[in-house]
Structures are given as structure tokens and as C-alpha cells.
Image: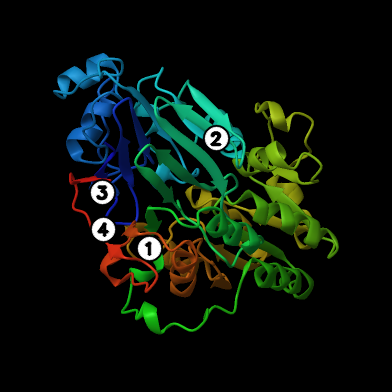
Amino acid sequence: MTNLKFYSGLREIGGTVVAVETDKAICIFDFGYAHADRIDDKVKVRKGKETIDLVRLGVLDKVDGIYEEKDAHELGLKAYGEVDKEVFVIISHMHIDHMGGLGSLASKLPVYMSRDSAVLYHELGVMGELELREHENVLPIDYDASITVGDIKVTCVQVDHDVLGACGFIIETDDGKLCYTGDYRYHGYHPEISKAFAEKCKGADYMITEGVTISFGDVDMLSLEGPVRDNSEWTLLDDMKAHAIEENGLIVINNYNRNVERVHRMIGALKECGRVFALEPAQADYVAAFYPEDYFEVYLPDGGELNAPLLKGKKIVTRKELMADAGKYILQQDYKNVYELFDLKECISLYLHMDGAPLGDYDPSFKKFYDLLDVLGLNYTKCGLGGHAEPYYLRSTVDEIAPKTLIPLHSFRPEQFKSEKVEKIILPQEGETISF
């Protein structure tokens, strides 16, 4: 018998953790932080008890067979190796709400992800941008390749999302076939990839889908006749070229630095406009990992050395050098370094908030961020695109796959998901188990 157990991420945007359990194996996906709003940045998890604190907070789930012995036993759980089945984890993509908990897992627990995700995951560790630590036993899978653990077969199927390496999965057992979308979009550079995902998953018995874009307002999915979005990564690229030509001074972008392909494409496009990208070290490292041919300079305000192996030999630009020729550059800057704007403001023509943190007004930092931009007197605009398929494409993807049973989650309002091509829609509760 095959059972599906739903731990978290059902009525929130984040923390999706679901287990597929058979007679011989347990497959868990994803493993990000749930109920992340419970985390207070002013409170530190205790050294040596990080996992225990996060589980007790409800940010990580109480699951047998995945934690180290000392953590599991203190939590009243079975540790990795103490469950009489093979346990493994699969990760859809490198966003914190889908992979942030990997550093808490038992070091020997197998964690599978796409090959591109594995590259990015390692570089996140190199640049110190992982929660806790880098997991030791990451096993890359090629797109469209399969692995079998016990009596569970998993196939990695690429989707288009705003992070490299994103994929969904086809999970097959003796009792049927399940597909999981992960997060995906149609307004990126590769809508054909998301379309191909639907074609490859056609006829699944069960489908678990994200539903982020039906979270924030009333949506009648059955009445949708087409997409309503008129912007995309391509229009954003055209807008950037126009800004690069029209503005005389420095342009600063606040881009989510895991959206590597966006920066790569801007590097090439803006070179034609006579602009050079100055990237902060983390962003520079991620671009170098996937696009070593790209030319950019690394922004170190006061100079210094670059320790990341992939950045050896890259040209450094300092604050003084950047300000002396501000019209030549586009500066990428993370929000955590926003006070650097105090010294740069006199040469800035335009600041673009482009999907970087803080993401929205639900974040306490959001108002503080825009208040600061006003205090600085900067010319700014918000031009983020988001990374999730709009409701029409959510429904059309389900219609194409036509699963017998649909399970929408990763949404504040999953009950709004409707399709005439499915036999049944299930809205599970946290902790609920469903049998195939």
C-alpha cells in the first residue's frame, strides 16, 4: 500500500513537506521552513540545539527517520537509520521555503535534487548563505533521469521558475503515479519547459500542485479564458535596456540573487548599452558557477581580496572607482547591504526593487526599506515579476495532466483551485494521511 502523509505547507506559501510511504521506502519532499513567521530574528536558536529549537517552534516538522540521533531522541522521534524502511528526501528547487531545513537533516540521509540545484546549493554554502550548514549527502539527478529507492521510483522533470535547477517530480509506486509541480511559471525565459512538464506528467493518478497566485484575492478559475499578465522576463530585459540608455548615473538593482539567469541575460544585454554589471560577491559567485564566460566586476566598497574559488582573477571595483564613473555601471545590491546607499546616493539615477528582499508588505522590513529610500531621496520603482504561474496557467496545467485526484497546497486559499478535468480535489489537513 502507498500512503501520502501531509506534514506542512498546505495553507501557507512555504514549508511544503509531504511523505510518500510504501512497504519498503519513504520519500519526503520538500524540506523548507514552515510557519516562518514564528522566527524572530532577534532571538537566536541555541548552539547545538538548532534543530531541536526549530522543530519545537514548528518551523521544522516532527518526522521519524530523518534527524541525527541526539536531536531525534530528545524530540521523542526515531533517528535516521532507526526506521525499518529506506528514507530519502527530494528537493524541487533552491528557495528557502523548499530547502531551508536541509542543514538540520542527518548527515548521511540521501537528498536528491537536480544537477543544477546541486551546483547552486554548494555555492550557497561557499558564500555562507545557507541556514545552519551544508548537507553532506546531496545526490544530483539529471533532468528526465530516474532513481529508484526500495519500491519508489522518482523522475526529475524540469520546470521554469525564477531560480536555476527548478524541477517537479514524477513519483511511481506499485499502486500508482503521482506528480508534484514544485513551483513553476510561464512568464519566464522558458515557458516551453513548464509546458513540457505537463505533457510528461499526463495521466497521473495523483497531482500535488502549488497555488501561490490564488492566495490573495477571489479567483473563479473555471471562467478564466487566458492569461492576463502583459509583463515577463523579456519585457523586464527590454525595460532595463531602456533605463541603461536613458539614465546618466548609477542604476542599482535589488534582485533576488538566486535568480541567476536574469542577471546573466542582463549582463549580455546591457553590455550593448555600454554598461558593466558590478555584482556583490555572492551574486558574482552564482553567476560564475553557471556562466563562466560572462564579464562582470565584483563590488567591494573598500577593496580587498576575493576568497571564493570561482571569483579568483575577477576584477574588483571599489566605491571610489564606481562613483568616479557611475554612468558606466549597474550595481546589484542585496537589501542587507542597503546602508551602502548613504555613500552612493549622490551618483544614483535610479533604484530598481526587482524581486529582492524585502518581498512584500507582510515583511516588517518592507515599510522600513521604502522609508529609507524616501529619506535618501532616491528615484525608485518596484519592478518585480514573481516566480509563480498565474491562475490560468495553474488550471491549464492541471487540465493537461488530467489527474484522477488533485491536491492543491502551498497557498493561502487552496480551496479556490478548480478544474473540470479531475475526478476529485482533496484539501488535506496537517498530519493527515491518504492512501492510494
State the separation of the CA atoms marked 4 and 2: 30 Å
State the separation of the CA atoms marked 3 and 4: 10 Å
Task: Identify the residue at image location x=32%, y=25%.
Answer: 24
Local packing at callout 1 (Cα closer than 10 Å; few below 14, some 14-19, many 20+) is many
Q: Is residue 323 visible?
A: no
Q: Say if 64 sits above or below 347 in the image.
A: above
Of tags 1 and 2, which is closer to the observer? 2
Of tags 4 and 2, which is closer to the observer? 2
Image x and y of residue 201, in percent: 50, 53
Task: Identify the residue at image location x=44%, y=82%.
Answer: 224
Of tags 3 and 1, which is closer to the observer? 1
Q: Say if 436 sits above or below 54 in the image.
A: below
| Residue 35's disc number | 3
State the separation of the CA atoms marked 3 and 1: 17 Å
| Residue designated by label 2 | 146
Going by the numbered disc 3, the residue's amino acid type is: His
Secondary structure state at the residue bearing disc 2: strand
Going by the numbered disc 1, the residue's amino acid type is: Gly
Of tags 3 and 4, which is closer to the observer? 4
Q: Is 107 in front, or is 148? A: 148
Residue 61 in the figure: left or right of residue 177: left
| Residue 11's disc number | 4
Residue 290: quadrant of the picture: top right
Residue 364 in the figure: left or right of residue 96: left
State the separation of the CA atoms marked 3 and 2: 32 Å
Secondary structure state at the residue bearing disc 3: loop
| Residue designated by label 1 | 211
**What is the number of callouts on the image?**
4
Does label 3 or label 4 sit earlier along the sequence?
Answer: 4
Does label 3 or label 2 sit earlier along the sequence?
Answer: 3
Name the image colouring. Answer: rainbow
Image x and y of residue 197, in percent: 56, 55
